[in-house]
Amino acid sequence: MYIGFGYDVHKFKKGRKLFLGGVEIAAPKGLDGHSDADVLIHALMDALLGAAGLNDIGHFFPNNDPQYKNISSLKLLETVCKELKNLKFKINNADITVIAQEPKIYPHIDKMKINISKALKLNKARIAIKATTNEKMGFIGRGEGIAALAVVTIKK
Ligand SMILES: [Zn+2]
């Protein structure tokens, strides 16, 4: 059994759509980034790659590569999943926390789990997604961005 941990943060930018867990969420601003800036999936991918002892997502999907411009991070997650399967790893479970002052994440969690379950071909019951605010403290509390943390276990 191998454990992986991932962390990511993106700042808000006007005129961008907000994607979290592959769900487009109605919000005044989206997150800035080269891809769709899905911070939740980025943290998850880093956790998966870390568990397998691989390099981070910046290595696999460089942010100056035009093929990844505005790409759905769910597609990148599928690639990471294939990478692990090629190495004979089997994903066991994922536990993800999103830290956002706004918008409300809770109503979208089930859809996020379905998206991730499909991308990883992993039973939805093995995927946990929790959301918390930052109690109005710091950059997240001021609504400047969203952070996500993920822990995964994989087996060989
Ligand atoms: Zn990211």
Image (cartoon, rainbow, N blue to C red):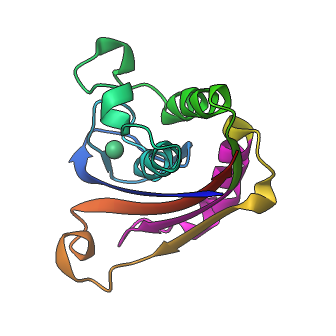
Q: Residue at x 35, y 73 (%)?
A: 101
Q: Residue at x 22, y 46 (%)?
A: 13
Q: Furthest-top residue in view?
A: 67
In-image side of 145 versus 130 (left or right): left
Tell me the quadrant of the picture where the C terminus can be found.
top right
Q: Nearer the viewer, residue 44 or 140?
A: 44
Q: Residue at x 41, y 61 (%)?
A: 148
Vertical side of 16 occupied by 99: above or below: below
- Where ligand 1 lies, by quadrant? top left
Quarter assignment of residue 33? top left
Residue 6, percent across and down?
42, 56
Specify the segment rendered in magenta. Answer: 93-117
In-image side of 104 versus 125 (left or right): left
Tell me the quadrant of the picture where the N terminus can be found.
bottom right
Q: Nearer the viewer, residue 107 or 94?
A: 94
Examine the structure image and report whether residue 122 is included in the region drawn in magenta.
Answer: no
